[in-house]
Amino acid sequence: MKFIASFIFLLFINFTVFAQAIEGNSETTTDLESYANSEIAIIPAPANLTKLAGHFVLPNNITIQVGKSPELKQTIAFLQERLSIPTGYHVNVINPPVANPTIKLIINDTEDASIGTEGYHLSVGVRQVVIRANKPAGLFYGVQSLIQLLPKEIESKEEVKGIKWVMPCVEVTDYPRLGWRGLMFDVARHFFTKQEVKQYIDAMVRYKYNILHLHLADDEGWRIEIKGLPKLTEVGAWNVKRIGTFGDFIPPTADEPRNYGGFYTQEDIKELVEYAKARFVNIMPEIDVPGHSLAAIASYPELSCTPEAINYKVRSGEKIMDWSRGAPPLGLVDNTLCPANEKVYVFLDTVFSQIAKLFPFEYIHVGGDEVARNFWEKNDQIKELMKREGLKTIPEVQAYFERRVETIIQSKGKKFMAWDEVLEGGVSPTAAVMSWRNMQHGIDAAKAGHEVVMSPTQFAYIDYMQADAITEPRVYASLRLSKSYEFDPVPAGVDPKFIKGGQANLWTEQVYNIRQAEYMTWPRGFAIAESVWSPKEKKNWTNFFARTEEHFKRLDIAETKYAPSVYDPIFTVRRSADRNLLITLTTEVEGLDIYYSFDNSFPDRFYPKYTTPLVPPVDAKVLKVITYRGKNPIGRMMNMPIEELEKRAGKR
């Protein structure tokens, strides 16, 4: 009897300790602790986060108490969906106050200056979750962080059984570093449907992006309906489908069907704008002029300075530029609008009048990049323009064009933005600059008093390869995750008031579908998101990558494609003193082992482990490598031809 009494007493003590842990009075070694090491993996990292003792357990019946702001509609819908579908729980939303709601979303009556318009306070206690913000956008971002505190299965599109739906108790005070947190999505090179654009918006807002820059016109397609200019979509939206390496396709023949492409009606655009707005995203349209305009010229040849334009077709990916001498390129066809032709400015006035009405955002992006000037240099109309306007150089001709376009943009009540090339010939003080070629152009623009958005190739071009060219769609440069994470959009020596923010750019020459768009965006989109949202001092690569790995698991469950390239070995080759090939293998992240073979078989962890530079055996044709973490393969099997390594090392 004494034994039974003692057992019951011990059982009571153990139950009390467990209950206290749940109530937050102490930490516990129960199975709840299995969440403790990986459960706080918020991206982008909050400005301030304090982990408290204990956990909040999601009840079977969830009550969300909210105010009456119509701007909260999408926030509530998102939270309802995420909390109900994977859990199978009932979620009830109420407006009037009730006793002890599960989650409270509160718009502050008195503004809290510490969090601004997009910040929030998130408090997860053992009995209740409270999110406070000054504005609805802050509540939306607070909800994104809240969802990231729940187990990864919360990302499921169907009910998941057997999950403990708990989250750690925390206090979070969070707000963005910068107001412009953008992703550029090129829908001109390859067309993406309205639904796919919505899908891209849904993904980006999970990481607190608030600008979607839509690249709507280029040599390969004109993607927006302009009333009164029907050929832009009848002709300009369609080309010949080619698959392979963009830029080197065989030119289409005259009889090949031009049925690949598409465009957005004005009703589509209105729908996308409203969809984005509900998620606190502004859409910035870009119509790239005067270069990159072959789709417009194929539709209306009179917009060109070149008589041969009457025969031009929308580009299908064949070579139209010679980049051998660098930038600016040598045009093989004249894909530029004619600055000396008044019809061009009438055309642009029509286009931008309708663009301005469709997109409420204050900026319109007009391109201005990579203008092939060789046709202008020999054109009589351009020469006459230069004489009449006192223009001494071809860059000044483009500057003349940009000033006139800015006048049109301003007449529509909008602000002019362009790529950094517009600085070369001189641009008005009111022009905003998006710096893409490097950070220095943005620094120069800011020092000259221009508003600047930083999107430099060396950190933010997410169309670049993420690993070795043998595993990626071949593009002319590489950009690894760790390099993207180094992005600092506010460089030293620049007045921060001129840096509006930063963004990543996804050009889609080699991106044929939305799954590849996802693959190219994530995880580098995490790195850029953290660079523009989180305080600079919070950035830490090791911590960031640990959180990224947790989000890989979330993306797996959400069935969102992402690149595992960060796990792939990095190949470095050189010649030894005796001219042998020496192959060095490294990894982007720590803690990985590399196993290899030269005998055409597929290595696993029982094969030789890489420790020192390798010399290929005589007659070996391929080096196969794979990375492991402990006993588990984590990287992709990579097949590196020895011939390729020989090329990279140069002549013997």
Image (tube, helix red, strand yellow):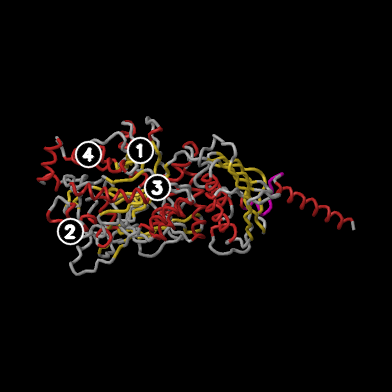
Q: Quickly name the residue at label 2.
A: 312
The Cα–Cα distance between marks 3 and 2, rounded to whole angstroms, is 34 Å
436 drawn magenta: no
Q: Residue at x 50, y 47 (%)?
A: 43
User: How many residues crowd mark 1 within 10 Å: few (<14), some (14–19), many (20+)?
Assistant: many
The Cα–Cα distance between marks 1 and 2, rounded to whole angstroms, is 35 Å
Q: Quickly name the residue at label 3.
A: 360
On the image, the x and y values in percent for residue 572 come to: 33, 49
The Cα–Cα distance between marks 1 and 4, rounded to whole angstroms, is 18 Å
Mark 3 or 2 closer to N-term? 2
Q: Quickly name the residue at label 1.
A: 452
Q: Quickly name the residue at label 4.
A: 399
Q: Is residue 588 above or below residue 489?
A: below
Instruction: Name the element at disc 4.
Output: helix
Q: Hey, what amino acid is under mark 1?
A: Val
Which residue is nearer to you in this view: 10 or 104? Answer: 104
State which quadrant residue 251 falls in: bottom left
Mark 2 or 4 closer to N-term? 2
30 drawn magenta: yes
Q: Hey, what amino acid is under mark 2?
A: Tyr
On the image, the x and y values in percent for residue 624 come to: 37, 60
Q: Which residues are magenta?
A: 25-34
